[in-house]
Amino acid sequence: MAITRRRFLVAGGLAGVALVLSDLRPLGSRGVAAAGASGRGAEAAYGDWRDVYRQKWTWDRIHKSSHFTNCWYQSHCAWNVYVKDGIVWREEQVAAYPQTRPELPDFNPRGCQKGACYSERMYDPARVLYPLKRVGERGSGRFKRVTWDEALDDLAAEFVRVATEEGPECIFWDNGPLYTFGAMAAAQARFSYLAGTVSLDMNTEIGDGHRGAAETFGKIVFERSADDYFYSDLILIWGANPVATQIPNAHFLYEARYNGTQLVTVAPDYSPSSIHSDLWVPVKPGCDAALALAVAKILIDEGLYDRDFVIEQTDLPLLVRDDDGRLLRQSDVEEGGDEDVFYWFDRRRGKAVAVPRERLELGGSDPALEGTYEVETRSGKVSVRPVFERLRERLADYTPERAARICGTPPALIRELARRLGAAKSATNVTTSNFSKYYHGNLIERSQALLFALRGHIGKKGGGFVAFPFLTNDGFDEFAISRTGLIDTAKLWANILPKKKWLEWHGFTDEMTTYELSRDSYR
Protein backbone atom coordinates (compact mmCIF):
# COMPACT_ATOMS: atom_id res chain seq x y z
CA MET A 1 0.00 0.00 0.00
CA ALA A 2 1.40 3.44 -0.95
CA ILE A 3 2.31 5.58 2.05
CA THR A 4 0.71 8.99 1.90
CA ARG A 5 1.60 11.88 4.16
CA ARG A 6 -1.73 11.51 5.96
CA ARG A 7 -1.25 7.75 6.54
CA PHE A 8 2.27 8.38 7.80
CA LEU A 9 1.15 11.01 10.30
CA VAL A 10 -1.74 8.88 11.55
CA ALA A 11 0.41 5.77 11.87
CA GLY A 12 3.27 7.65 13.48
CA GLY A 13 0.97 9.31 15.98
CA LEU A 14 -0.74 6.05 16.96
CA ALA A 15 2.60 4.30 17.32
CA GLY A 16 3.90 7.01 19.63
CA VAL A 17 0.76 6.94 21.78
CA ALA A 18 0.87 3.13 22.02
CA LEU A 19 4.51 3.14 23.13
CA VAL A 20 3.87 5.69 25.84
CA LEU A 21 0.65 4.16 27.14
CA SER A 22 2.12 0.65 27.34
CA ASP A 23 4.12 1.74 30.38
CA LEU A 24 4.27 5.18 31.94
CA ARG A 25 7.73 4.51 33.38
CA PRO A 26 10.87 5.79 31.59
CA LEU A 27 11.45 3.57 28.58
CA GLY A 28 15.26 3.94 28.28
CA SER A 29 16.83 0.75 29.71
CA ARG A 30 13.75 -1.41 29.24
CA GLY A 31 13.54 -0.39 25.59
CA VAL A 32 17.16 -1.29 24.92
CA ALA A 33 16.85 -4.69 26.61
CA ALA A 34 13.70 -5.54 24.69
CA ALA A 35 15.28 -4.60 21.41
CA GLY A 36 18.40 -6.64 22.19
CA ALA A 37 16.35 -9.68 23.02
CA SER A 38 14.59 -9.52 19.70
CA GLY A 39 17.87 -9.96 17.83
CA ARG A 40 17.48 -6.80 15.69
CA GLY A 41 21.10 -5.74 16.04
CA ALA A 42 21.54 -2.02 15.23
CA GLU A 43 17.91 -1.25 16.01
CA ALA A 44 18.67 -1.88 19.69
CA ALA A 45 19.71 1.79 19.93
CA TYR A 46 16.05 2.68 20.47
CA GLY A 47 15.77 4.75 23.63
CA ASP A 48 12.23 6.10 23.93
CA TRP A 49 9.21 7.21 21.89
CA ARG A 50 11.07 10.24 20.52
CA ASP A 51 13.31 7.97 18.49
CA VAL A 52 10.27 6.90 16.46
CA TYR A 53 9.89 10.46 15.26
CA ARG A 54 13.60 10.96 14.78
CA GLN A 55 13.65 7.98 12.44
CA LYS A 56 10.66 9.23 10.51
CA TRP A 57 12.01 12.79 10.32
CA THR A 58 15.33 11.98 8.72
CA TRP A 59 16.05 12.76 5.10
CA ASP A 60 18.26 11.53 2.31
CA ARG A 61 19.00 15.10 1.23
CA ILE A 62 17.77 18.67 1.47
CA HIS A 63 17.43 20.84 -1.64
CA LYS A 64 16.90 24.57 -2.10
CA SER A 65 13.85 25.36 -4.21
CA SER A 66 11.22 27.97 -4.97
CA HIS A 67 7.61 28.21 -6.13
CA PHE A 68 7.36 30.61 -9.03
CA THR A 69 4.07 29.65 -10.65
CA ASN A 70 1.05 31.94 -10.40
CA CYS A 71 2.41 33.84 -7.43
CA TRP A 72 2.60 37.31 -8.95
CA TYR A 73 5.50 39.63 -8.25
CA GLN A 74 6.18 38.32 -4.73
CA SER A 75 7.06 34.84 -6.02
CA HIS A 76 10.28 32.87 -5.71
CA CYS A 77 10.30 32.56 -1.93
CA ALA A 78 13.24 30.44 -0.79
CA TRP A 79 12.39 26.98 0.54
CA ASN A 80 14.21 23.93 1.89
CA VAL A 81 12.80 20.79 0.29
CA TYR A 82 13.29 17.58 2.28
CA VAL A 83 13.59 14.44 0.15
CA LYS A 84 13.47 10.82 1.24
CA ASP A 85 13.47 7.86 -1.15
CA GLY A 86 13.11 10.30 -4.04
CA ILE A 87 9.89 11.81 -2.64
CA VAL A 88 9.37 15.30 -1.24
CA TRP A 89 8.04 14.88 2.28
CA ARG A 90 8.36 18.37 3.66
CA GLU A 91 8.90 21.99 2.64
CA GLU A 92 10.20 24.61 5.01
CA GLN A 93 11.00 28.30 4.65
CA VAL A 94 14.71 29.05 4.48
CA ALA A 95 14.39 32.40 6.29
CA ALA A 96 17.89 33.50 5.33
CA TYR A 97 17.12 36.90 3.81
CA PRO A 98 19.46 39.70 4.94
CA GLN A 99 18.05 42.75 6.66
CA THR A 100 17.96 45.76 4.35
CA ARG A 101 18.12 48.52 6.97
CA PRO A 102 18.39 48.42 10.77
CA GLU A 103 15.17 50.41 11.24
CA LEU A 104 13.12 48.17 8.93
CA PRO A 105 11.58 44.73 9.44
CA ASP A 106 13.37 42.08 7.43
CA PHE A 107 11.85 39.91 4.73
CA ASN A 108 12.03 36.67 6.70
CA PRO A 109 10.66 34.13 6.58
CA ARG A 110 8.78 34.65 3.24
CA GLY A 111 6.50 31.90 2.04
CA CYS A 112 2.97 30.83 2.85
CA GLN A 113 0.87 27.75 3.47
CA LYS A 114 0.36 27.43 -0.28
CA GLY A 115 4.07 26.94 -0.70
CA ALA A 116 4.31 24.69 2.34
CA CYS A 117 1.91 22.21 0.76
CA TYR A 118 3.08 22.61 -2.84
CA SER A 119 4.34 19.02 -2.91
CA GLU A 120 0.75 17.90 -2.39
CA ARG A 121 0.04 19.30 -5.86
CA MET A 122 3.09 17.52 -7.24
CA TYR A 123 1.70 14.17 -6.19
CA ASP A 124 -1.97 14.97 -6.77
CA PRO A 125 -3.57 12.04 -8.64
CA ALA A 126 -5.58 14.54 -10.70
CA ARG A 127 -2.44 15.85 -12.40
CA VAL A 128 -2.00 15.04 -16.08
CA LEU A 129 1.42 13.39 -16.25
CA TYR A 130 1.37 12.01 -19.78
CA PRO A 131 0.38 13.19 -23.26
CA LEU A 132 -3.28 12.54 -24.07
CA LYS A 133 -4.72 12.51 -27.59
CA ARG A 134 -8.37 13.18 -28.29
CA VAL A 135 -10.12 10.20 -29.88
CA GLY A 136 -13.71 11.42 -29.72
CA GLU A 137 -15.63 14.47 -30.83
CA ARG A 138 -14.45 17.78 -29.45
CA GLY A 139 -16.07 18.24 -26.07
CA SER A 140 -16.72 14.53 -25.59
CA GLY A 141 -13.85 14.21 -23.12
CA ARG A 142 -12.54 11.04 -24.79
CA PHE A 143 -8.74 10.81 -24.82
CA LYS A 144 -6.12 8.10 -25.01
CA ARG A 145 -2.62 8.08 -23.63
CA VAL A 146 0.21 8.29 -26.17
CA THR A 147 3.97 8.27 -25.85
CA TRP A 148 6.02 11.44 -25.67
CA ASP A 149 7.66 10.60 -28.99
CA GLU A 150 4.30 10.18 -30.67
CA ALA A 151 2.95 13.43 -29.24
CA LEU A 152 6.03 15.46 -30.17
CA ASP A 153 6.15 13.96 -33.67
CA ASP A 154 2.50 14.92 -34.26
CA LEU A 155 3.08 18.45 -32.98
CA ALA A 156 6.22 18.94 -35.05
CA ALA A 157 4.57 17.64 -38.22
CA GLU A 158 1.57 19.96 -37.83
CA PHE A 159 3.83 22.88 -36.92
CA VAL A 160 5.85 22.41 -40.11
CA ARG A 161 2.71 21.96 -42.22
CA VAL A 162 1.06 25.16 -41.01
CA ALA A 163 4.29 27.15 -41.21
CA THR A 164 4.98 26.10 -44.80
CA GLU A 165 1.44 26.10 -46.17
CA GLU A 166 -0.13 29.03 -44.29
CA GLY A 167 2.80 30.90 -42.78
CA PRO A 168 4.31 30.95 -39.27
CA GLU A 169 2.16 33.94 -38.34
CA CYS A 170 -0.81 31.54 -38.32
CA ILE A 171 0.67 29.63 -35.37
CA PHE A 172 -0.43 31.00 -32.00
CA TRP A 173 0.89 30.27 -28.53
CA ASP A 174 -1.67 30.56 -25.75
CA ASN A 175 0.56 30.77 -22.68
CA GLY A 176 -2.14 31.12 -20.07
CA PRO A 177 -1.30 32.12 -16.50
CA LEU A 178 1.60 29.64 -16.28
CA TYR A 179 4.01 32.17 -17.78
CA THR A 180 6.73 32.00 -15.14
CA PHE A 181 9.69 34.03 -16.43
CA GLY A 182 11.78 30.92 -15.78
CA ALA A 183 13.50 28.53 -18.17
CA MET A 184 10.18 27.18 -19.43
CA ALA A 185 8.90 30.61 -20.43
CA ALA A 186 12.26 31.66 -21.87
CA ALA A 187 12.39 28.57 -24.09
CA GLN A 188 8.89 29.16 -25.44
CA ALA A 189 9.48 32.86 -26.02
CA ARG A 190 12.76 32.22 -27.81
CA PHE A 191 11.27 29.52 -30.01
CA SER A 192 8.27 31.67 -30.92
CA TYR A 193 10.51 34.64 -31.68
CA LEU A 194 12.89 32.73 -33.96
CA ALA A 195 10.10 30.84 -35.73
CA GLY A 196 8.12 34.00 -36.42
CA THR A 197 5.01 32.74 -34.63
CA VAL A 198 2.63 34.75 -32.45
CA SER A 199 2.43 34.61 -28.65
CA LEU A 200 -0.92 35.81 -27.36
CA ASP A 201 -1.04 38.52 -24.73
CA MET A 202 -1.71 36.72 -21.46
CA ASN A 203 -3.26 39.78 -19.86
CA THR A 204 -6.14 39.67 -22.31
CA GLU A 205 -7.09 36.37 -20.68
CA ILE A 206 -6.54 37.15 -17.01
CA GLY A 207 -6.96 40.95 -16.97
CA ASP A 208 -3.85 41.96 -15.03
CA GLY A 209 -3.09 44.90 -17.28
CA HIS A 210 -3.43 48.02 -15.10
CA ARG A 211 -4.59 49.95 -18.12
CA GLY A 212 -5.68 52.88 -15.96
CA ALA A 213 -2.15 53.39 -14.66
CA ALA A 214 -0.77 53.16 -18.19
CA GLU A 215 -3.24 55.73 -19.50
CA THR A 216 -2.60 58.11 -16.61
CA PHE A 217 1.16 57.94 -16.20
CA GLY A 218 2.38 56.64 -19.56
CA LYS A 219 3.92 53.57 -17.96
CA ILE A 220 2.40 50.47 -16.46
CA VAL A 221 4.62 49.28 -13.62
CA PHE A 222 4.74 51.17 -10.31
CA GLU A 223 6.13 49.21 -7.40
CA ARG A 224 8.90 49.16 -4.85
CA SER A 225 10.21 46.75 -2.26
CA ALA A 226 7.64 45.85 0.36
CA ASP A 227 9.69 47.23 3.25
CA ASP A 228 8.95 50.73 1.92
CA TYR A 229 5.49 50.41 3.51
CA PHE A 230 7.25 51.03 6.82
CA TYR A 231 7.84 54.65 5.74
CA SER A 232 4.14 55.30 4.96
CA ASP A 233 1.78 57.00 7.37
CA LEU A 234 -1.36 55.92 5.48
CA ILE A 235 -1.82 52.76 3.43
CA LEU A 236 -4.97 52.20 1.39
CA ILE A 237 -5.88 48.55 0.86
CA TRP A 238 -8.32 49.43 -1.89
CA GLY A 239 -9.69 46.51 -3.88
CA ALA A 240 -7.11 44.11 -2.46
CA ASN A 241 -6.90 41.44 0.21
CA PRO A 242 -3.17 41.04 0.92
CA VAL A 243 -3.74 38.81 3.95
CA ALA A 244 -4.87 36.11 1.52
CA THR A 245 -3.17 37.06 -1.75
CA GLN A 246 0.14 38.67 -0.72
CA ILE A 247 1.06 36.58 2.29
CA PRO A 248 4.88 36.95 2.02
CA ASN A 249 4.55 40.75 2.02
CA ALA A 250 1.55 41.26 4.29
CA HIS A 251 3.58 41.32 7.50
CA PHE A 252 5.13 44.62 6.42
CA LEU A 253 1.66 46.20 6.43
CA TYR A 254 0.89 45.10 9.95
CA GLU A 255 4.33 45.86 11.31
CA ALA A 256 3.92 49.33 9.80
CA ARG A 257 0.57 49.66 11.58
CA TYR A 258 2.24 48.61 14.84
CA ASN A 259 4.72 51.41 14.15
CA GLY A 260 1.92 54.00 13.83
CA THR A 261 0.86 53.77 10.17
CA GLN A 262 -2.87 53.95 9.49
CA LEU A 263 -4.36 51.08 7.47
CA VAL A 264 -7.62 51.73 5.62
CA THR A 265 -9.33 48.92 3.70
CA VAL A 266 -11.87 49.79 1.00
CA ALA A 267 -13.72 46.61 0.05
CA PRO A 268 -17.27 45.28 -0.36
CA ASP A 269 -16.73 42.60 2.29
CA TYR A 270 -15.32 42.61 5.78
CA SER A 271 -12.31 40.73 4.52
CA PRO A 272 -9.37 39.30 6.50
CA SER A 273 -7.46 42.45 5.56
CA SER A 274 -10.31 44.63 6.83
CA ILE A 275 -10.14 42.95 10.22
CA HIS A 276 -6.57 44.14 10.71
CA SER A 277 -7.20 47.71 9.54
CA ASP A 278 -7.89 50.92 11.43
CA LEU A 279 -10.84 51.74 9.18
CA TRP A 280 -13.05 49.65 6.90
CA VAL A 281 -14.84 51.53 4.12
CA PRO A 282 -17.52 49.35 2.48
CA VAL A 283 -18.28 49.94 -1.20
CA LYS A 284 -20.48 48.23 -3.78
CA PRO A 285 -18.51 46.09 -6.27
CA GLY A 286 -17.50 48.05 -9.35
CA CYS A 287 -18.61 51.42 -7.92
CA ASP A 288 -15.23 52.52 -6.59
CA ALA A 289 -14.90 55.35 -9.13
CA ALA A 290 -17.87 57.18 -7.59
CA LEU A 291 -16.28 56.87 -4.16
CA ALA A 292 -12.91 58.15 -5.43
CA LEU A 293 -14.48 61.12 -7.23
CA ALA A 294 -16.39 62.09 -4.09
CA VAL A 295 -13.13 61.98 -2.15
CA ALA A 296 -11.52 64.15 -4.85
CA LYS A 297 -14.31 66.70 -4.53
CA ILE A 298 -13.76 66.96 -0.77
CA LEU A 299 -10.00 67.36 -1.22
CA ILE A 300 -10.57 70.27 -3.60
CA ASP A 301 -13.50 71.91 -1.78
CA GLU A 302 -11.71 71.83 1.58
CA GLY A 303 -8.36 72.93 0.14
CA LEU A 304 -6.65 69.67 1.06
CA TYR A 305 -4.85 69.27 -2.25
CA ASP A 306 -1.15 70.08 -2.76
CA ARG A 307 -1.28 73.12 -5.03
CA ASP A 308 2.47 73.29 -5.69
CA PHE A 309 2.62 69.62 -6.70
CA VAL A 310 -0.48 69.91 -8.87
CA ILE A 311 0.94 72.87 -10.78
CA GLU A 312 4.43 71.47 -11.25
CA GLN A 313 3.84 67.75 -11.72
CA THR A 314 0.41 67.32 -13.34
CA ASP A 315 -1.49 68.49 -16.42
CA LEU A 316 -4.16 70.21 -14.32
CA PRO A 317 -2.92 73.77 -15.10
CA LEU A 318 -2.99 73.19 -18.88
CA LEU A 319 -5.57 75.15 -20.84
CA VAL A 320 -8.46 73.40 -22.61
CA ARG A 321 -10.49 74.93 -25.42
CA ASP A 322 -14.18 75.24 -24.56
CA ASP A 323 -15.23 74.88 -28.20
CA ASP A 324 -13.78 71.42 -28.92
CA GLY A 325 -12.53 70.15 -25.53
CA ARG A 326 -8.94 69.76 -26.75
CA LEU A 327 -5.82 71.05 -25.03
CA LEU A 328 -4.69 74.39 -26.44
CA ARG A 329 -1.67 73.73 -28.65
CA GLN A 330 1.00 75.83 -30.28
CA SER A 331 -0.40 74.73 -33.63
CA ASP A 332 -3.66 76.50 -32.66
CA VAL A 333 -1.84 79.75 -31.98
CA GLU A 334 1.05 79.88 -34.47
CA GLU A 335 1.43 78.91 -38.09
CA GLY A 336 3.59 75.77 -38.19
CA GLY A 337 3.39 75.37 -34.42
CA ASP A 338 3.94 72.02 -32.72
CA GLU A 339 1.13 69.69 -31.71
CA ASP A 340 2.86 68.80 -28.45
CA VAL A 341 3.50 72.28 -27.04
CA PHE A 342 0.75 73.20 -24.58
CA TYR A 343 -0.21 76.35 -22.67
CA TRP A 344 -1.14 77.54 -19.22
CA PHE A 345 -2.36 80.95 -18.08
CA ASP A 346 0.44 82.78 -16.28
CA ARG A 347 -1.18 85.04 -13.68
CA ARG A 348 2.04 86.99 -13.32
CA ARG A 349 2.14 87.93 -17.01
CA GLY A 350 -1.62 88.02 -17.42
CA LYS A 351 -1.65 85.86 -20.54
CA ALA A 352 -1.39 82.30 -21.86
CA VAL A 353 2.21 81.14 -22.30
CA ALA A 354 3.76 77.94 -23.61
CA VAL A 355 4.61 75.37 -20.95
CA PRO A 356 8.38 74.69 -20.88
CA ARG A 357 9.24 71.13 -21.89
CA GLU A 358 12.90 70.99 -20.96
CA ARG A 359 12.30 71.37 -17.21
CA LEU A 360 9.61 71.06 -14.54
CA GLU A 361 10.60 74.25 -12.77
CA LEU A 362 8.05 77.00 -13.23
CA GLY A 363 10.69 79.53 -14.22
CA GLY A 364 8.96 82.50 -12.63
CA SER A 365 5.52 81.57 -13.96
CA ASP A 366 2.44 81.48 -11.75
CA PRO A 367 0.03 79.13 -13.57
CA ALA A 368 -3.67 79.54 -12.84
CA LEU A 369 -5.77 76.56 -11.78
CA GLU A 370 -9.13 78.35 -11.85
CA GLY A 371 -10.88 80.78 -14.15
CA THR A 372 -11.98 81.29 -17.75
CA TYR A 373 -9.80 83.15 -20.24
CA GLU A 374 -9.78 84.25 -23.87
CA VAL A 375 -6.90 83.35 -26.18
CA GLU A 376 -6.25 84.67 -29.67
CA THR A 377 -5.83 81.72 -32.04
CA ARG A 378 -5.27 81.45 -35.77
CA SER A 379 -9.03 81.10 -36.21
CA GLY A 380 -10.02 83.87 -33.79
CA LYS A 381 -10.65 84.28 -30.08
CA VAL A 382 -11.32 81.10 -28.12
CA SER A 383 -12.51 80.63 -24.54
CA VAL A 384 -10.19 78.38 -22.51
CA ARG A 385 -10.08 76.99 -18.97
CA PRO A 386 -7.48 75.04 -16.98
CA VAL A 387 -8.00 71.29 -16.67
CA PHE A 388 -8.35 71.83 -12.91
CA GLU A 389 -11.32 74.15 -13.44
CA ARG A 390 -13.01 71.60 -15.68
CA LEU A 391 -12.29 68.89 -13.11
CA ARG A 392 -13.92 70.96 -10.38
CA GLU A 393 -16.98 71.40 -12.60
CA ARG A 394 -17.17 67.66 -13.31
CA LEU A 395 -16.86 66.81 -9.62
CA ALA A 396 -19.82 69.04 -8.70
CA ASP A 397 -22.13 66.05 -9.19
CA TYR A 398 -20.17 63.86 -6.77
CA THR A 399 -21.20 65.12 -3.38
CA PRO A 400 -20.78 62.49 -0.64
CA GLU A 401 -24.56 62.12 -0.46
CA ARG A 402 -24.99 61.51 -4.18
CA ALA A 403 -21.94 59.26 -4.37
CA ALA A 404 -23.33 57.25 -1.44
CA ARG A 405 -26.40 56.39 -3.50
CA ILE A 406 -24.11 54.99 -6.20
CA CYS A 407 -21.37 53.25 -4.24
CA GLY A 408 -23.18 52.44 -0.99
CA THR A 409 -20.54 54.06 1.22
CA PRO A 410 -22.03 56.24 3.99
CA PRO A 411 -21.33 59.97 3.43
CA ALA A 412 -19.64 60.26 6.83
CA LEU A 413 -17.18 57.52 5.88
CA ILE A 414 -16.46 59.20 2.54
CA ARG A 415 -15.55 62.39 4.39
CA GLU A 416 -13.48 60.42 6.90
CA LEU A 417 -11.53 58.74 4.10
CA ALA A 418 -10.92 62.07 2.34
CA ARG A 419 -9.70 63.82 5.47
CA ARG A 420 -7.38 60.99 6.44
CA LEU A 421 -5.89 61.09 2.96
CA GLY A 422 -5.72 64.89 3.13
CA ALA A 423 -3.83 64.80 6.43
CA ALA A 424 -1.34 62.10 5.42
CA LYS A 425 2.25 63.10 4.70
CA SER A 426 3.17 60.01 2.70
CA ALA A 427 0.30 57.79 1.56
CA THR A 428 0.33 54.76 -0.68
CA ASN A 429 -1.87 51.85 -1.73
CA VAL A 430 -1.54 48.10 -2.06
CA THR A 431 -1.28 46.91 -5.63
CA THR A 432 -4.10 44.78 -6.98
CA SER A 433 -5.15 43.46 -10.35
CA ASN A 434 -8.78 43.50 -9.25
CA PHE A 435 -9.99 46.58 -11.12
CA SER A 436 -8.25 45.54 -14.34
CA LYS A 437 -10.87 42.83 -14.68
CA TYR A 438 -13.88 45.17 -14.52
CA TYR A 439 -15.57 46.72 -17.53
CA HIS A 440 -14.27 50.30 -17.46
CA GLY A 441 -11.98 49.23 -14.63
CA ASN A 442 -9.38 51.54 -16.11
CA LEU A 443 -11.57 54.47 -15.04
CA ILE A 444 -11.67 53.17 -11.47
CA GLU A 445 -7.89 53.03 -11.45
CA ARG A 446 -7.59 56.49 -12.99
CA SER A 447 -9.90 57.96 -10.35
CA GLN A 448 -7.69 56.43 -7.65
CA ALA A 449 -4.58 57.88 -9.29
CA LEU A 450 -6.27 61.29 -9.30
CA LEU A 451 -6.41 61.26 -5.50
CA PHE A 452 -2.69 60.60 -5.19
CA ALA A 453 -1.94 63.33 -7.73
CA LEU A 454 -4.12 65.89 -5.93
CA ARG A 455 -2.40 65.17 -2.64
CA GLY A 456 1.11 64.96 -4.10
CA HIS A 457 1.61 61.43 -2.81
CA ILE A 458 3.83 60.46 -5.72
CA GLY A 459 7.61 60.23 -5.76
CA LYS A 460 7.92 60.20 -1.97
CA LYS A 461 9.55 57.63 0.27
CA GLY A 462 6.73 55.49 1.61
CA GLY A 463 4.26 57.10 -0.79
CA GLY A 464 3.03 56.71 -4.32
CA PHE A 465 0.38 55.11 -6.45
CA VAL A 466 1.17 51.42 -6.85
CA ALA A 467 0.24 49.31 -9.86
CA PHE A 468 2.00 46.10 -10.73
CA PRO A 469 0.75 43.78 -13.48
CA PHE A 470 1.98 40.24 -13.98
CA LEU A 471 2.86 41.18 -17.55
CA THR A 472 2.48 44.36 -19.52
CA ASN A 473 -0.07 44.70 -22.29
CA ASP A 474 0.51 44.66 -26.01
CA GLY A 475 1.26 48.17 -27.15
CA PHE A 476 3.10 49.09 -23.96
CA ASP A 477 5.70 46.36 -24.31
CA GLU A 478 5.83 46.03 -28.07
CA PHE A 479 9.32 47.47 -28.01
CA ALA A 480 10.71 45.20 -25.31
CA ILE A 481 8.98 41.88 -25.98
CA SER A 482 8.32 41.32 -29.65
CA ARG A 483 5.13 39.57 -30.68
CA THR A 484 6.52 39.12 -34.19
CA GLY A 485 9.28 37.17 -35.87
CA LEU A 486 12.89 38.13 -36.34
CA ILE A 487 12.47 39.80 -39.74
CA ASP A 488 9.33 41.69 -38.73
CA THR A 489 11.05 42.82 -35.54
CA ALA A 490 13.91 44.30 -37.56
CA LYS A 491 11.36 46.22 -39.65
CA LEU A 492 9.60 47.35 -36.48
CA TRP A 493 12.78 48.75 -35.00
CA ALA A 494 13.68 50.44 -38.27
CA ASN A 495 10.40 52.33 -37.93
CA ILE A 496 10.72 52.98 -34.20
CA LEU A 497 14.31 54.21 -33.87
CA PRO A 498 13.94 57.47 -35.84
CA LYS A 499 10.81 58.40 -33.87
CA LYS A 500 12.45 57.43 -30.60
CA LYS A 501 15.52 59.59 -31.29
CA TRP A 502 13.35 62.53 -32.39
CA LEU A 503 11.33 62.37 -29.17
CA GLU A 504 14.44 62.12 -27.01
CA TRP A 505 15.97 65.08 -28.86
CA HIS A 506 12.88 67.12 -28.01
CA GLY A 507 13.21 66.38 -24.29
CA PHE A 508 10.79 63.46 -23.89
CA THR A 509 11.46 61.19 -20.92
CA ASP A 510 11.56 57.40 -21.28
CA GLU A 511 7.97 57.16 -20.03
CA MET A 512 6.78 59.87 -22.43
CA THR A 513 8.63 58.22 -25.31
CA THR A 514 7.07 54.84 -24.57
CA TYR A 515 3.64 56.45 -24.34
CA GLU A 516 3.98 58.22 -27.70
CA LEU A 517 5.32 55.13 -29.47
CA SER A 518 2.53 53.06 -27.95
CA ARG A 519 -0.05 55.47 -29.34
CA ASP A 520 1.50 54.95 -32.77
CA SER A 521 1.01 51.20 -32.45
CA TYR A 522 -2.77 51.74 -32.14
CA ARG A 523 -3.09 54.11 -35.10
Image: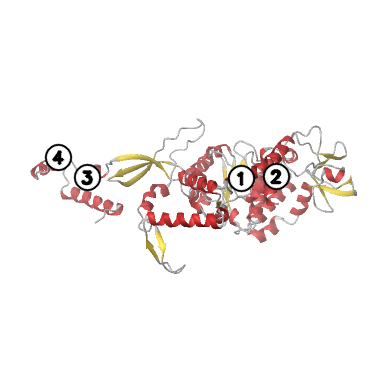
Point out the residue furthest to the top here: 102
Query: Label 2's element?
Result: helix
Distance from disc 4 to disc 2, alpha carbons, whole Å, reads 76 Å
Distance from disc 4 to disc 1, alpha carbons, whole Å, reads 69 Å
Of residues 279 and 167, the one drawn nearer to the viewer in this rendering: 167
Looking at marks 4 and 1 on the same chain, the residue that comes earlier in the sequence is marked by: 4
Q: Residue 42, labelled with which disc? A: 4
Q: Which residue is mark 3?
A: 52
Point out the residue furthest to the right here: 380
Q: Which residue is mark 1?
A: 489
**Are the residues at dot 4 and dot 2 in contact (C-beta closer than 8 Å)?**
no
Looking at marks 4 and 2 on the same chain, the residue that comes earlier in the sequence is marked by: 4
Q: Where is residue 169 drawn, in percent x and y?
A: 57, 54
Query: Label 1's element?
Result: helix
Distance from disc 3 to disc 1, alpha carbons, whole Å, reads 63 Å
Q: Is residue 121 left or right of residue 289?
A: left
Q: Is residue 148 left or right of residue 398?
A: left
Identified by mark 3, the residue type is Val
Of residues 451 and 184, the one drawn nearer to the viewer in this rendering: 184
Q: Residue at x 85, y 46 (%)?
A: 332
Distance from disc 2 to disc 1, alpha carbons, whole Å, reads 19 Å
Distance from disc 2 to disc 3, alpha carbons, whole Å, reads 68 Å
Q: Which residue is mark 2?
A: 516
For the residues carrying marks 3 and 1, which lies nearer the camera in this image? 1
